[in-house]
Amino acid sequence: GVIFFNKKYFTSKQILDTMPGLLSMAAAEGMDLAQAATILAGGLRGMNLDMKESMRLADAFAYTSAHSATNITNLGEAFKAVAATASLQGASPEQLLSYLGVLANLQVEAGEAGNAIKSAFMRRDNSSF
């Protein structure tokens, strides 16, 4: 996990700030630290969150996974497709994950769900001009 963060140009302080969230996310589904680091780092950067928000994001992923028909790995795949657009539109990570959870309950595949929500955000943005 630490090696992944280092390769993605995080400072030592930023890496330490993510540790509680990283360990929490990995433990939530028994995934390895590298996989959790990939999802967490991508989510934090995609949503333009401070590294100290790692626990908040890890909790949101774990909650959505526990209350929908998906898992953290699939949520991470969908999340990376839409996080930056959602952030620009003012959506919180919790809102975005709840949308992804609803689509998972409707049996929409992770990649499709992320792209569908991204398209919806983009259409909403374009309709305001």
Image (cartoon, helix red, strand yellow):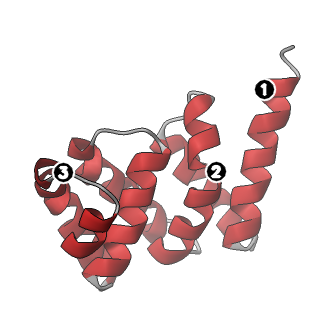
Query: Residue 53, position in %: x, y?
Result: 27, 44
Q: Disc 2 designates what residue? A: 82
Residue visible at 49% across and 47% down in the picture: 46
Q: Which mark is residue 125?
A: 1
Q: Quadrant of residue 18?
A: bottom left
Please tell me which residue lies in front, 119 or 65: 119
- Closest to the camera, between mark 2 and mark 3, is 3
Badge 2 marks a residue whose secondary structure is helix
Q: Which mark is residue 104?
A: none
Q: Quadrant of residue 49?
A: top left
Instruction: Estimate the spatial distance between the alpha carbons at disc 3 and disc 1, rounded to whole Å.
Output: 34 Å
Q: Is residue 60 left or right of residue 70?
A: left
User: Is 60 situated above or below 89?
Assistant: below
Badge 1 marks a residue whose secondary structure is helix
Q: Quadrant of residue 1?
A: bottom left
Q: Disc 3 designates what residue? A: 11
Q: Is residue 111 left or right of residue 100?
A: right
User: Is 73 situated above or below 116?
Assistant: below
